[in-house]
Amino acid sequence: MLSLHEMLEKKDDVGAKPIFFDLSQTADQNKLSALFADNKIQHVSDDFEEQHQELFAVRNPTIVYTAGFKEKFKKYYEELKTQKPLQEHGHWVYFPWLSKIVHILAEEDFFIVRTARNKNLINTEEQEKFHNAKIGIGGLSVGSSVAYAMTLQGGPKHVKLADMDRLALSNTNRILSGVDNLGMLKVEMAARFMYQINPYMEIELYPDGLTPENIEGFCKDLDVVIDELDNLSVKFLIREQAKKYKIPVVMAADNGDNAVVDVERYDLEPDMPYFHGRMGDVSYDMLTKLDKFGIGKMITKHVGPENVTERMQQSLMEMGKTIVSWPQLGGAALINGAAVAYCVRKILNSQPLEKNRALVYLDEKLIPTWNEPTEIKKRAAIADGFRKIFGL
């Protein structure tokens, strides 16, 4: 028997993928029984009747608000029981990291109910295109918010996640995760949460991040690539592949409480300059050789000094002095996630969308004095000072 110290030092090695069981199959019954015998399952969730009531309502919307709805559903549910035992309907999904098993509808029915409340903000055709797409996300700080926003909306079933980092305590001010995941690879953290929302997803993990060796395999079969990476040289490589395979790129940067969203439509304009030319004439080799100041200058060029909030500018100048990294807020990460998910859905449905940049600013919408001449003049002066610091 392991000692307390040995148990505390034991690592979590259960992975990030759920396991499905079809209890109409004897082999699956035996496998599930073995998990119970080994005490691997500590929690059982079976809300199957409620799921079927929702399914019945979605399929019969005209009778939902009639007096006989409950009786008609009861008759429908009793007929299900006559076909085979209820436990043999649908699937049982085992989440090893939760020691929990959940009874859910079969995939098609599950998707119908999960997305029922999207209608008709997202219509059936739009939902199918969104769901059947293949999306890659590089970088899982803001990128995890993007992944969760898309998953909540019934978005891409096929997703690739790339990030080499592990969740740190300081990340939890902006990444939707608890302290129970500290030290976990961010790709596993994100995949687990996404599978808990939709166990039928197919998620491919790149725990080494994106490199010159794996980036083509990551990008070439995607419908849209999401760039939330910090590494400028890898951002360049993403755009090389996007141009080669004509894949749209969406990138969002948090800026205080706000979001700067960039859309690069290499599917429509494969010869457009990388980053819309905002960084100037750059190359992979040049970007790999930048020092800390050079990286700051290049990021400032791309975002635009006029778009960097005053407190963000002040904070960037304090890195290595009074703070250890550039500041980021959880609210801004969520705004970025929602904005990028919106862009992805519009792209997949060939709907009108900004082809360059959009500023999603809470400051502009909610600060009463934002558009007053004195405030505009003040921001312009601050931006000019920031340009001078970097020689722009």
Image (cartoon, grey):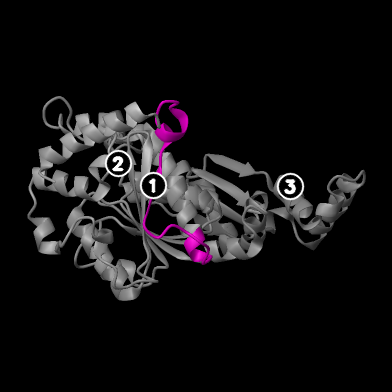
Q: Which mark is residue 308?
A: none
Amino acid type of the residue that numbered disc 3 sits on in the rendered structure: Glu
Query: Disc 1 designates what residue?
Result: 144
- The picture quadrant where one finds residue 227 is bottom left
Name the mark nearer the viewer: 3 or 2.
2
Mark 1–mark 3 distance (CA, rounded to whole Å): 32 Å
> What x and y, as percent, mark residue 236?
22, 61
- Magenta residues? 346-370
Hey, what amino acid is under mark 2? Answer: Asn
User: Is 350 a magenta residue?
Assistant: yes
Q: Residue 307's mark?
A: 2
170 shown above or below 53: above
Membership of 35 in magenta stretch: no
Q: Nearer the viewer, residue 274 or 28?
A: 274
| Lower sequence index among marks 2 and 1 | 1
> Is 49 left or right of 110, judged from the image as shown?
right
